[in-house]
Amino acid sequence: MISEDGGPTLEELATRAAAGDRAALEELLAEIQPRVRRICGRMLIYPEDAEEATQDALLLVATKIGGFAGRSKFTTWLHAVASNSARSTYRTLKRRAAERPTDDLPATPDPRTTSVIAGSRLDLLDALEILGADRPELVEPLVLRDVQQLDYNEIARLLDVPLGTVKSRIHSARHAVRPLLAVHD
């Protein structure tokens, strides 16, 4: 299959990169960077935090591509890597904020590490961490729908699960995170 511009598709590049083709890996990383930045930017408020998560995700892709066996679509794997990277960056920011001595704390809270508004991305990231501990299979569909704003059919295709399963998982995830978000009201 050839992409719209006549070059190889992401799937082909990923397969070649997984087999050790260095040129394919370089091309793949260049092609996916804007997509990864968008995914991370939808989850993290500040562009510099999204950029940090993007770079971490690209590094993971580069180092873990050999483990991509093609059992699922590359874009599914990529969404998981990018979303997990954004969530990891958020956890790191929270940990750094908690470790700072109180003398070093700013007069006003850092909105990157302090949940201020109920229903904000920060509250959602905290809720996703809690949900992921008990029901990890619910996190990705919820992120793809409510954060990445993909439609149900596209999520089903990306995750390679039936449409009904996607809808059920999103419903269950929303039901589970709603009380976690309401705590801040």
Image (cartoon, rainbow, N blue to C red):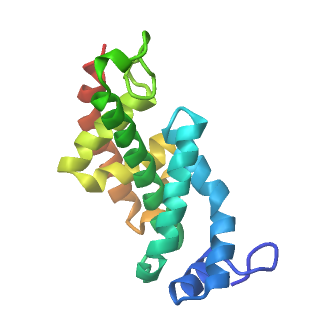
Q: In front: 119, or 19? A: 19
Image spot of residue 40 (x, y percent)? 53, 47
Q: As drawn, which residue projects farthest toward the right?
A: 5
In the picture shown, does residue 44 fall above or below 118?
A: below
Q: In front: 69, or 140? A: 69
Image spot of residue 107 (x, y percent)? 42, 9
Q: Quadrant of residue 13?
A: bottom right
Residue at x 68% of width, y 66% of height: 31
In the picture shown, does residue 119 fall above or below 2?
A: above
In the picture shown, does residue 157 fall above or below 135?
A: below
**Residue 40 shows up from this direction:** yes
Image spot of residue 3 (x, y percent)? 74, 76
Q: Quadrant of residue 101?
A: top left
**Residue 149 shows up from this direction:** no
Residue at x 45% of width, y 22% of height: 111
Q: In front: 144, or 45? A: 45
